[in-house]
Image (cartoon, coloured by chain):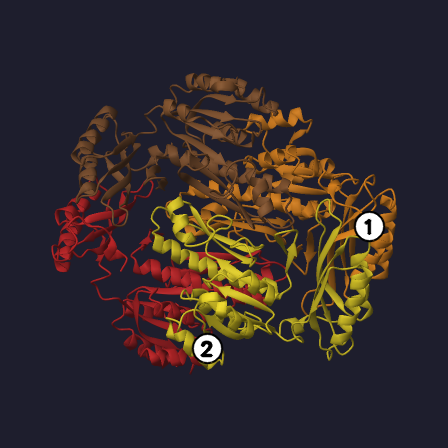
Chain colours: A brown, B red, C orange, D yellow
């Protein structure tokens, strides 16, 4: 809504939408010039261009926002135009997204007994602050302890699948079927480890929230680990899932102060609050095309 | 130094410097395209472009950073190129700056008895974190209470001018002479009000630090005002000086928590800490061409 | 729950509850000694004592937390013991509260069209994070725009009273009846001014949330005032209501950064977020006996 | 100075000083009562008492601040009075300190090539914000790269000892002699590991600053480790030195945000800024008797 209010030069009757473009290619002179020329030649108007060229590397990364009138620059022509640029610069990555025209990202949320992140995502989704479609929720617990969750899901027609952990990854096969046409997955405190075979078969991004300040406190019960270590700040980390446990590229981290007055229980409560914010922020950034893989095991967050 | 390490495509022997360009003109399609084309055609490489078009306004503001090789794109040609663009788009403002090639901004600092801001600016200047040349320091106090200041100024060859407040703005005439060839002025807790006539004669920007959270607590003794009001947060405000006292466009504001345990004295101490940071930040932003006047009495800080 | 887990010296079968005591009296030697002796003589155990004696004043303020076994120190004896101390030190104020034994504070929330604060308080109340009983909600709007609110209130048996603003303060008389046996009132963005007569008749504390950083931006539309002033930080202020509009003792203030990219609409949204936190924090502090009136128009928040 | 302004009941001519007392003993009823009775019986006036009893433990920890008139309660009698209480409650720890009467803590700072922490401590010391006497500075570098440091030390009569790292801990023996009559040691980025034998011989507390967010990134080059891990927040940790490298009880931790735009160099710079604050804060807390060892490997910071 706010987007459509952005001024355009084509007068009052025009409808102007926001486009986002990210680009990764070898660094040469004139990439921004070509990008902006392409946009301008179609009557589009650039809002911002953020460029990143790592020190001592010949790599170019950019993220652009522009507004345009889709009656003058049809959505499929936008794609074609950027594909041409992509070829021109031998780009490794070129994604364009028009939130008002494109289908929302389709996701599946995997959860477990600790539901605070699931509840928070559903709440934000209902408020319109999580620009995704939730295909279903998968849990390895029969029913969520919180009956509000089930009622909420029923009211919104979101299926809840109970897939208990089983021998031989039988449940993983079922999960694979359920997530087939999603754009990415969200592990909202899903306490199971997904196998390398699963990651390979799925092939798309999976965002996890870890209730510890990685790379400290990997694996089980990080709050207990932090409590025993006597840290003065606890943290949460959202990251991409890779084969190595809790070691994928970090997207976002947040911390909060603790003291000797904190008990293990209050560590857990403070952590839960961090986890909710950290995971929601990571998903939001991801949907706005702000998160790019970078170097071997890092992210770049525009 | 770090700037020169930025990668360029022209090979190891080239020398690459950073250029900054700000632009303000009526909003039309293709401004970024033309700007980036201009830069690319000279072998320059854009680092970032930040564009701002106010809602429902036909106004375009941008700030660009680019690296270029001045042997291929000489400094005066840079200017000419941007002047052409400026004419093309009927720009109200077009400034280009190449920190490594251009003379540093020349400033005069006006101070008074409270020296914390002056001392902080001198310290930052010595550390190389304040990219300006200080022509002189003007004070309405005979000698700074802190003898370190005088020794510091002597060691660095910066004159200290004692100009007592006098009848009929006689001192203002002397100040005008001393600041003649400066780029802007800094009032580092200068407790005198500069007359409208002075502002007009000087004609360039003057940055002031106010020890209160404007628009609350204008005028004298804002810490006392805040203390009496029982506020729970105190603030400092750096702003441009206009004829109306403490009412010019705000550049930066910072706050800090206070409680009933704070005395008027600790209000003052906490405020001084805020003032130093707030003023230094405003000057830094200003020198990096991040601060633009905006609308009647606001700033835009890229 | 957590409170009962606090260790006691009387062994595993004992039941230990938390007591809170605040005290305001002329400052003499030995007040803490007498207070703690009184508590210890009854088998109580002090958790913390916070004392405040203003500079150059003979005023003593304290807030103590202690755990005790009510079978050994019955609730009414606790009261009697502290009343004796109160007389001994000619205390102006001596309040004792045992959250696990005493009735919850009874409040009425007054709201209007902007419901974000009301919704937030109800949500926190349901989660058990607002230790009050809500007698009813009074609004000068017929029905809340958000039907969730009405459904929520119905589900929890909280009456919703529609009292339109009327000539001659007729509605104030009705409000007075409805709030008769409350402990304090909360104005959750209630956009009406309560008359001096009402304040006098009610005679107890009223906590208001103002959507501006007081003492700046009193009165109507503070977000618009802040937007026009070009501030770089916006704020919210919770305070006690007095006869002078938006000028009562400040309890809590919070701020958030804004920039030229913010619109009036985003000012309002950011402000709403601050208002919710600021009001909830003020109520929580108040219920925990942390907030005391101090000097003419200030608060002291332990 | 501010301390002496605190109000007393004994009239204008009295001189009132601040006393601090920390206590650790088995938890029984009435400890605060006895402590405050002891203070009141001598005409002292309690400012604050902070008590901590860990959940499910019979351990009592407290820190009290009180003002008293040393002509009525002489310094040595203060000690005797608290020793009696200490015996009464079989205290493991009972320390009393009167900053205005007691000798300042005597410390030695051990430094190395990275001087930012040393410089910061000297600067704060000169400003009167570090309440210690610095016996000398020991470094394993011949002369500090920054000649200001040497000039500063000379001007203030603080010896600079160059003790190169050598085979067989020969330098440790020399260090032991130099630190003999200190109260504690500060490792201000001293890049050598002190042997277990040294720690045992010295026998007092040693505060170290680690340029990483422990327990992540122990050992060498933590900034590089953090950079390679792609973290979004970097940290610094001040802790007590124990035989296990970078694993002693944590006193204070601070973090700062980093992004893909940060280079290893800017990681180091941001870290240095954190280290300075974190180390100075730990020393300040320690001198104010706020830091107590707690459980096996933690601290309690009042």
Which of labels 2 and 1 is toward the front?
Answer: 2
Residue D198 image-quadrant placement = bottom right
What's the distance in space between the residues labelled 2 and 1, CA to CA?
Answer: 54 Å
Depth check: give the residue in front, C216 or C18: C18
**B275 vs A106: above or below:** below
Q: Is residue A191 visible?
A: yes
Q: Give residue D41's position: percent from left, percent from top.
A: 82, 68
Residue C280 image-quadrant placement = top right
Please report, as a chain letter, where disc 1 is located. C
Q: Give residue A251's position: percent from left, percent from top.
A: 41, 39
Question: Which residue, given by chain and number where applicable, does mark 2 sit on?
Answer: D153
**C62 vs A213: above or below:** below
Q: Is residue B263 visible?
A: no
Question: Which residue, given by chain and number where applicable, does mark 1 sit on?
Answer: C44
Q: Residue furthest front?
A: D168
Q: Give residue D33's position: percent from left, percent from top.
A: 81, 59
How many other residues sit within 10 Å of disc 2, few (<14), some (14-19) or many (≥20)? some
Which residue is depicted at the point 15% across and 57% down? B70
């Amino acid at each position: 809504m706010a987007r459509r209010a952005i001024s355009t030069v084509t007068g009052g009757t025009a409808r102007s939408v926001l486009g986002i473009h990210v680009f990764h290619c070898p660094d040469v002179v004139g990439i921004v010039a070509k990008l902006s020329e392409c946009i301008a030649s179609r009557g589009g108007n650039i809002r911002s261009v953020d460029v990143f060229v790592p020190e001592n590397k010949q790599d170019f990364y950019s993220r652009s926002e522009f507004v345009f009138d889709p009656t003058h620059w049809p959505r499929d022509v936008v794609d074609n135009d950027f594909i041409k640029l992509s070829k021109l610069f031998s780009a490794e990555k070129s994604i364009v997204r028009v939130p008002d025209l494109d289908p929302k990202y389709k996701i599946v949320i995997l959860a477990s007994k600790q539901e605070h992140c699931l509840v928070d995502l559903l709440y934000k989704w209902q408020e319109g602050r999580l620009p995704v479609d939730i295909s279903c929720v998968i849990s390895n617990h029969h029913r969520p302890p919180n009956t509000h969750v089930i009622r909420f899901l029923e009211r919104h027609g979101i299926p809840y699948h109970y897939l208990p952990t089983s021998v031989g990854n039988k449940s993983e096969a079922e999960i694979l079927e359920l997530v087939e046409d999603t754009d990415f997955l969200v592990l909202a405190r899903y306490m199971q480890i997904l196998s390398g075979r699963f990651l390979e078969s799925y092939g798309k991004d999976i965002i996890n929230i870890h209730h510890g300040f990685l790379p400290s406190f990997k694996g089980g019960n990080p709050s207990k680990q932090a409590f025993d270590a006597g840290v003065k700040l606890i943290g949460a980390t959202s990251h991409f899932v890779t084969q190595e446990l809790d070691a994928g590229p970090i997207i976002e981290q947040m911390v909060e102060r603790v003291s000797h007055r904190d008990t293990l229980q209050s560590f857990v409560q403070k952590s839960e609050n961090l986890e909710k914010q950290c995971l929601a922020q990571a998903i939001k950034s991801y949907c706005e095309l702000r998160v790019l893989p970078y170097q071997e095991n890092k992210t770049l967050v525009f």
